[in-house]
Amino acid sequence: MPLFGAVIVGDEILSGRRADKHLAFIAKALNERGLTLAWARYIGDNADAQAQLYAETFAGDTIVFSFGGIGATPDDHTRLAAATAASVMLEQHPEATALIEARFGETAYPNRVRMAQLPTGSILIPNPVNQIAGFSLGQHHFLPGFPEMAWPMAEWVLDHYYAGEGEVRQTVGFIVPGAKEGDLIDLMEVFVSNHPALGFSCLPSYGNDRHPEPHIEFSVSGKPQLAEDAAAELRAALVARGYPIAR
């Protein structure tokens, strides 16, 4: 199954002036298709730092969604950074140029048309909102920072290029009231060792909307039957140690 990563660009996010929503979106969009987000990176509007990051990710096998920085303002460096990282030139992409001209007419010049300057070899990602395309370069997919544009574009990429790549997965969770992580490390280590193909999560809490008292929320994820069986095994091991189980 392919690995996916996310790059989220913008000083406004790193400074706290704007809250990021892309990470939660792309994780959910992948999960819905039986795919998994392996990592995420945040980076500011710095051309050199972006180029270095993309050079690292181009060198790997991960499929990367990059959000932000593909506009035409002085703080938008992603297009140039991607070209630099891939050791190619920026060129005026004919189809992207035509889309911008059709959308904006004479006002496409002199500035909006700059957004059609893309790394050599780029393939367009259609933008259903204003027709200013994103672009794919290899297994990297570059999208605008605006969620209303970026999210349907990301879903188009997933459904166009990666349909059928995922597997049906299920997450089975339960709550153990009064449990403490430190008392259960040995049990968890044995469980994880016995089930290397499954995802495992241990989330302690002092109380929340799901359960008002201190507790641990355990979850097991993977192929449905394997996840169900392993979760039942974990519940049984906890009950054997005297812990109650709550949903």
Image (cartoon, rainbow, N blue to C red):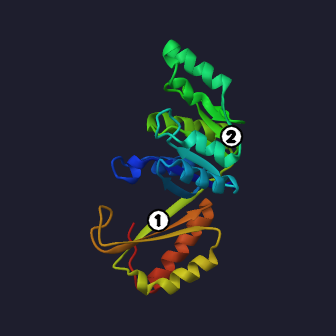
**In the rendered view, does 23 fall on the left or right side of 2?**
left
Q: Residues within 10 Å of mark 2 (few under 14, many from 20)?
A: few
Percent position (x, y) of residue 83? 65, 42
Picture residue at 60% right of the left edge, 41% below the top: 80
Of the numbered discs in the image, which one, if any, rests on residue 90?
A: none
Return the disc, 1 or 2, that comes first in the chain's sequence: 2
Picture residue at 70% right of the left edge, 36% below the top: 120
Percent position (x, y) of residue 89? 69, 38
Up the image or down, 150 lies above or below 173; here it is above
Q: Which residue is mark 2?
A: 161
Task: Give the total number of marks visible in the rendering.
Answer: 2
Depth check: give the residue in front, 210 or 146: 146
Depth check: give the residue in front, 59 or 173: 59
- Three-letter amino acid code at the position of disc 1: Gly
Q: Residues within 10 Å of mark 1 (few under 14, many from 20)?
A: some
Q: Residue furthest top?
A: 106
Of the numbered discs in the image, which one, if any, rests on residue 173?
A: 1
Percent position (x, y) of residue 119? 66, 37
Q: Gap in Å between the C-alphas at discs 1 and 2?
A: 32 Å
Task: Give the SS element for disc 2.
Answer: helix
Q: Are marks 1 and 2 in contact (CB under 8 Å)?
A: no
Asked if residue 162 can be seen in this view, the reply is: yes
**In the rendered view, does 84 fall on the left or right side of 107?**
right
